[in-house]
Amino acid sequence: MNVLVIGGGGREHALVWKLSQSPLVETVYCAPGNPGMVGVEAVASTDIETLCAFATDHRVGLTMVGPEAPLCAGIVDAFRSRGLRIFGPDRQAAQLEGSKAYAKAFMEKYGLPTAASGVFHEAQPALDYVRAQGAPIVVKADGLAAGKGVVVATTLAEAEAAVRACFDGAFGDAGKTVLVEECLIGEEASILALTDGKTFAPLASSQDHKRIGDGDTGPNTGGMGAYSPAPVVTEALWETIRRDILAPFVEGCRREGLDYRGVIYAGIMVTAQGPKLLEFNVRFGDPETQAVLMRLDSDLAEALVATADGQLDQVQLRWSPEPAVCVVMAAGGYPGAYAKGLEITGLEAAAASGAVVFHAGTARNAAGRIVTHGGRVLGVTARAPNLRAAVDKAYQAVGCIHWDGAYCRRDIAHRALEH
Ligand code: AMP
Ligand code: GLY
């Protein structure tokens, strides 16, 4: 079977890395892919119609979508209408990530635990609500804002400024609708599960590190590192998550008539009252996937095909008990402005040390050298018999890699080590 992966970041590198190990898979194509992907054929287009034609011409038996944007744009609908097998939710279901107001309404309708909130289309009622509730409080732009549309305000002034920024167009159309939400206190975890619309199969738990600085300080980023499993997700908590979140999620999709054959990512806060949903993502997490897939012992291609075919009950996922850790190396200045085109050295030495270096924001320059090409540049990922050893192995590999201004957090997995 030929496989096509859509996307070109660290998550997609991890997906093609795992898919390439499957005996079911012949050629792996990736659109657009990245220079770290070995043995993978790059496809230059990101246009949905062109990709449909490519999949037909190259006898692609499975297309797997990494990022949310093509899902929200309806890539799944386009492929399925041509009889092409694709893994992911349809356009309507992708609104669970594309619109926070839509997701909130879904959670409330089907009784999924989440923060109390109000949805507003104008500034004044939103400001009134903020003042009535008091700080701390959370302000969210409704639409996709590349992870930047959420402000956890510790003061009223900060919350009011966030509301005004949204309605003043700071997030474009994404901020025309605003959610104001109760601030939840607890530890976060990323819960990912495959679902074929009938049943679900949870993946190993994980946790990412959203802030740029050690000790979870500074601005939010796309994610600075991840580890799996997340010790905060105990067996007892898994039971609650299955019963109160995943089962009603699948049932809600069925009743809404959503065609959801893909992966659901539930961002949860483990509060004193139990797990509560912060958000849905309709795709694999980045960098959680890098850590999670390192622990998957069973065949990913088989699981994705079964999911897309509505036969998820036919597969059993097997996980290594060994923990895995992914440390993101970012360009100096990220998540603000940063330079591109800086040569990266030490990649071979890092790989020789036993870690897997997933590329995220890299490119090949005219001289054929690997250079930086994004904010999050690499995801250095390692698995070991215990978490301490996995952390040490990942950082040892990080130590081999160099470019001017390279930055990484030094405390990935600190919470898990404390548990
Ligand atoms: P979201 O994009 O909705 O996941 O929000 C991004 C981040 O903001 C989350 O990962 C949390 O760290 C934080 N956050 C979102 N909603 C809340 C909330 N209701 N209470 C506390 N923190 C939140
Ligand atoms: N790591 C967070 C995300 O993928 O949205």
Image (cartoon, rainbow, N blue to C red):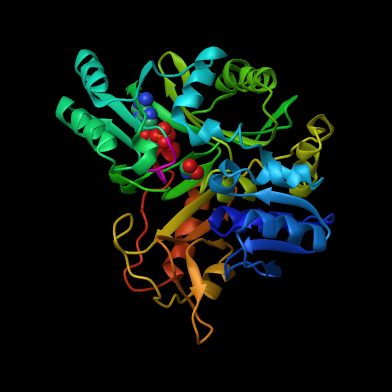
Q: Left or right: 76 with respect to 162?
A: right
Q: Residue at x 57, y 60 (%)?
A: 8
Identify which residue is drawn at 57% across, 66% down. Answer: 34
> Residue at the location (50% across, 52% down)?
326
Residue 295 appears in the rendering: no
Q: Quick check: 369 above or below 61? A: below
Vertical arrangement, residue 393 with respect to residue 183, above or below: below
Q: Is residue 285 visible?
A: yes
Magenta-colored span: 143-147
Residue drawn at (62%, 16%), measured in percent from left and top? Answer: 243
Q: On the picture, is 407 further left or further right than 328?
A: left
Relative depth, front residue between 181 and 290: 181
Seen in the picture, residue 14 relative to 101 is either above or below; the reply is: below
**Where on the picture, by quarter, is residue 119?**
top left
**Residue that sits furthest to the left in the current view:** 157
Q: How many marks?
A: 0
Q: Which quadrant is the N terminus positioned in?
A: bottom right
Q: Position of residue 7 (x, y in %)?
A: 59, 56
Name which quarter of the figure residue 130 lies in: top left
Q: Nearer the viewer, residue 287 or 387?
A: 287
Q: Position of residue 214 (x, y in %)?
A: 31, 48
Q: Is residue 172 magenta?
A: no
Q: Position of residue 361 (x, y in %)?
A: 47, 64
